[in-house]
Amino acid sequence: MVDWRRSSSDVPESRVGLSNIRTIPIILRLALTCKRIPKYIMPMINTPKTGMPAGALPMLILRVIQTGPLHGYAIAQRIHLLSSEVLAVEEGLLYPTLQKMLLKGWVTAEWGVSETNRKVRFYRLTPEGRKYLKSELAEYDRVSHAIREILRTA
């Protein structure tokens, strides 16, 4: 197994060509000087797309809980079902996003019991969240209209 944490003294400075980047891991420094990028540097090349546009998850969460409080799993299921099973929200993305939304004041959370008798947090939209959702929906409409116009006229 290769140790990627080796110090910069393991690579000749002339090979790296950048003497002030000693804190960059050796594999990245080598990649900077290579003509081609090794496979192990860019593992996301063959990763399938999730279908979720960047930055859309908070807007979707807020829109889904606009009708009433839901717990995390129910939010993910509702987004999946309302998108005709096109969009899937991974737990590893959903809960950190909900936590950030709590910190920003867009949602509140309170503990309760789910329909399966489990202790869960129910998320509720706040007035700040409602205001943010309104502005995000307006921006989404503006951008999607511009993209439709380009696709229609190009």
Image (cartoon, helix red, strand yellow):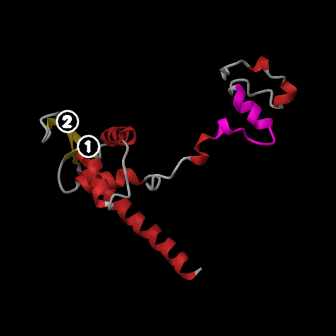
Of the numbered discs in the image, which one, if any, rests on residue 92? none
**Residue that sits furthest to the bottom in the current view:** 153
The residue sitting at 26% across, 55% down in the picture is 64
Q: Using the rendered image of the protein, determine whether residue 130 is visible from the camera's viewpoint.
A: no
Numbered label tally: 2
Of the numbered discs in the image, which one, if any, rests on residue 73? 1
- The location of residue 120, given as percent across then percent down, is 19, 35
- The location of residue 127, given as percent across then percent down, is 23, 52
Amino acid marked by disc 2: Val
Q: Using the rendered image of the protein, determine whether residue 120 is visible from the camera's viewpoint.
A: yes
Between 25 and 38, the one nearer to me in the picture: 38
- The location of residue 128, given as percent across then percent down, is 28, 50
Determine the image quadrant of residue 99.
top left
The residue sitting at 60% across, 40% down in the picture is 43
Determine the image quadrant of residue 100.
top left
Looking at the image, residue 79 lies above or below residue 119: below
The secondary element bearing badge 2 is classed as strand
Decide: marks 1, 2 in contact (CB < 8 A)? yes
Q: Main secondary structure of the magenta part?
A: helix
The residue sitting at 52% across, 50% down in the picture is 48
Distance CA(mark 1)–CA(mark 2): 9 Å
- The region drawn magenta spans 26-42
Which sits earlier in the primary sequence, circle 1 or circle 2? 1
Between 125 and 8, the one nearer to me in the picture: 8
Between 32 and 128, the one nearer to me in the picture: 32
59 relative position to 50: left or right: left
Q: Quadrant of the C terminus?
A: bottom right
Q: Residues within 10 Å of mark 2 (few under 14, many from 20)?
A: some
Task: Say which residue label 2 marks.
Answer: 120
